[in-house]
Image: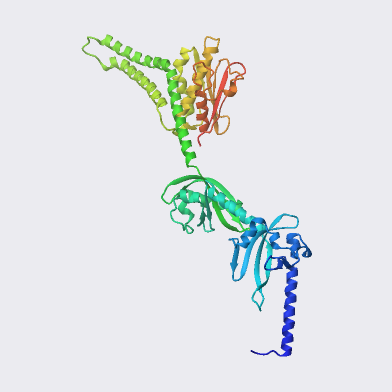
Amino acid sequence: MKTRTPEEGLTALTDDAERNRLLAEMAEQSTDMISRHTPEDWRFIYVSPAVTHLLGYSVEEIVGMSAYDLYHPDDVEDFRLRAPTVNYDRGLYTHTYRFRCKDGRYTWLESTSRTIRDPQTNEISEILVVSRDATHRIKADKANRRLARVLESTQDLVIFLNLDLTVSHLNEVARMALQLEQTDYSSFPLSWFVTEKGHAQLMDEGIPAARRSGNWRGELDMRSLKGRRIPVMLELLAHRSLHGDIEYFSLVAHDLTEKKAAEEQLKQYQADIDHASRLVTMGELASSLAHELNQPLSAVVNYLRGVERRFAGQERITWSDLELPISRSIRTALRAGEIIHRMMDFTRKQEPVISDLDLSELIQEMVDFCESTAERHHVRVVCQVPAGLPLVRGDRVQLEQVLLNLIVNAIEASAYDCEEPFATVRVKADDQVPGHVCVRVEDQGGGISEADLPRLFDRFFSTKQSGLGMGLAISRTLVENLGGELWAENLPERGARFSFTLDTAD
């Protein structure tokens, strides 16, 4: 062992003193609380001035106090028993706990402690501790744990994405819905979990919008690894760092499977109701239809009986003799066939077919169709539709249903209330508003009472004693499904007007 010279020994003592001075100065200036404690009862032997900032005590007040007296009661045993909140690594203990401040409240501290042993006896002489405020970290950890619990308990699919749009995390609901059987999914691309159309929608709309404004929302179809389609309402979020750079994306997808199934069921229910309404309408018109069919059939019989009477017993008959009665019979039979065909189309249960329609022609057909009903009620139906109306978008059978309902209602209202020998129902149409055609059906009835007007389109509400209260409600639904409106109003002089709009064809 090399022996130091007196000069070297003096230099070493000077260096140790300077180092101790610097360490003491650092302790005095540090924002962390540095303290020394007795090994048995952890009484403060020394504490740095940071104690005032952290706990509110002065140095003089806390020296001599036991740390055990300041621990939160629930944390004392954790430290004594070295619970999981106490970590040991290479001679250093790190402990997170609650410590009582001078004002009585508790604050979270994180302390790293080390035992100092007597070099002669190897017994613990004191404990050196460095403590810092851990309140913000503990609160952040608790918030993160709460968010994690919410993340795993929510019924929405939650997916976190890296910047290259590969998956970094999925919650349990997403793993089950997407039928992930393996645990390592971190390398899976997002394109595996959305349909081709949905992926294109995200690339073209979702990602650019999220980069610009931070979020995007839209409906699309996801798919599991086994091919099951999942309709979702999806929200895409871009998460940024403190510097403003996007760090990752998250997807929150609400499964719309049940909602879509319910909508489809409601759509089917609505179709069944509409069909039933048409059948009821035909039932109400049965006597008029029978009369309308009876006319052409009787005419055919009369034509053929005339031929029979005229040419009975003649051996030679020329075509010129038969041409007129036979051609009339054919035309009349075709007319009867058209009536039956229209009835079958109107009552047939079928999916709507949206197309461009000539509204002028359709209105005239419905006016002709209701002619017998109008005559039976002593009502005239006047069609005032100008030539050259633009085509409209709609389903032919549905528009026939709306027009038939409004015209028949107008005929019945006029017949019941009009005092004139022949009341008049007017059917009008115009395209004064660009992009729309407006149809109006005006009657000469007694009008609509102020009490009935707000409920007129409610289901099961009817002003007729034998009415089901479905016709107007269904008519409004059909018009609104085509993007139009249906409303009612009283005319200034007498009667009521029912109007509806339709979009013109592009």
Front in this rendered view, residue 38 or 367: 38
Left or right side of 181 for 153 = right
Q: How is the image coloured?
A: rainbow
Can you give x and y, in whole percent of width and height, for residue 444 in the image?
56, 15
Q: Residue at x 55, y 12 (%)?
A: 418
Give the image quarter of residue 249.
bottom right
What residue occupies the far left of the structure in this picture? 315
Residue 167, placed above or below residue 494: below
Give the image quarter of residue 101.
bottom right
Q: Residue at x 69, y 89 (%)?
A: 4
Picture mark count: 0
Left or right side of 227 for 203 = right
What is the quadrant of the N terminus in the image? bottom right
Front in this rendered view, residue 450 or 258: 258
Residue 268, placed above or below residue 375: below
Residue 344 seen in this snapshot: yes
Left or right side of 106 for 224 = left
Can you give x and y, in whole percent of width and height, for residue 67 in the image?
70, 62
Give the image quarter of residue 333.
top left
Residue 210, placed above or below residue 407: below
Can you give x and y, in whole percent of width and height, for residue 373 in the image?
46, 16
Can you give x and y, in whole percent of width and height, for residue 201 in the image?
50, 49
Residue 116, placed above or below residue 171: below
Q: Residue at x 65, y 71 (%)?
A: 115
Front in this rendered view, residue 445 or 8: 8
Left or right side of 253 for 493 = right
Residue 194 seen in this snapshot: no
Front in this rendered view, residue 445 or 31: 31
